Amino acid sequence: MNLFETVKSAVTVKQAAEYYGCKVNRGDMVCCPFHDDQHPSMKLNRDYFYCFGCGATGDVIDFVARLFGLSSYEAAKKLAYDFGIDPDKPPAAMALKKPYPLARAFRNDEIYCQRVLCDYLHLLEHWKIEYAPQSPEDELDDRFVEASQMIDYVEYLLDILMFAELEQRVKAVDMLLNDGTIAALERRLKRLEKEVQHRGEERAIA
Ligand SMILES: [Zn+2]
């Protein structure tokens, strides 16, 4: 079995959704992380998910790829890592192995940092295109400048948080939480989101 098959046979969509912080209700429904979903409209089956609100669908690897903005291969690697899957062993042999032995608190902190940084990265990628100068005489938009300066660094941080050795990841999470980076970023992202919504409403009225 290749990495994709191994991961898919070892981890259900529901397990992954729970692990990465989605609240799964008794009917195996969750609030869709891929659109602004107030009531659970995504159904989690064993092998695939389907959102009745936005039509998002796919397998467990698609789910994680989209959740964290990763390629399919990166998502498969992340799942293998987070669920302690050894790609060289058949799933049955590791069924009894616990997901990796980290304290739950650290795991939550780590996922929190990953989510905030992913949101920020997506915003920067959007800005880099949306606010790119149209001609050489154009004054550079602040958002374009920020995107140009920050994308590499945010990608680097995410790389550490997702794929580095445990010791390095613990250090990175400590740094990001203790110096207030993540908290400040989260507040800013929420504020920006509100501004965008507000502008949308004004436009709708006008
Ligand atoms: Zn949806």
Image: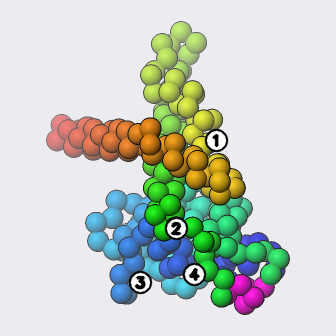
Q: Are marks 2 and 3 in contact (CB under 8 Å)?
A: no
Type of residue at label 1?
Tyr
Seen at 45% across and 27% down, the residue is 143
Of residue 3 and residue 34, the one placed in the foreground of this image is: 3
Instruction: For marks 3 and 4, give the CA distance.
Output: 12 Å
Seen at 73% across and 78% down, the residue is 6
Q: Measuring from the top left, give residue 178's x and y in whole percent.
A: 44, 43
Type of residue at label 2?
Ala
Provide the residue designation for mark 4: 12
Instruction: For marks 2 and 1, give the CA distance.
Output: 24 Å
Observer able to see residue 52: no
Seen at 44% across and 38% down, the residue is 179
Indicate whether 42 appears above or below 171: below
Q: Measuring from the top left, give residue 191's x and y in whole percent.
A: 30, 40
Q: Earlier in the sequence, mark 2 or mark 4?
A: 4
Q: What number is the disc on residue 28?
A: 3
Which residue extends farthest bottom?
92
Q: Earlier in the sequence, mark 2 or mark 1?
A: 2
Q: Secondary structure at mark 3?
A: loop
Q: Measuring from the top left, give residue 54's x and y in whole percent.
A: 41, 66
Magenta residues, as a range? 90-95
Instruction: For marks 2 and 4, give the CA distance.
Output: 22 Å
Provide the residue designation for mark 2: 103
Q: Are marks 3 and 1 in contact (CB under 8 Å)?
A: no
Among the 4 quarters of the image, the one containing residue 93 = bottom right
Q: Earlier in the sequence, mark 1 or mark 4?
A: 4
Provide the residue designation for mark 1: 156
Would residue 35 appear left or right of 125 to someone viewing this image?
Answer: left
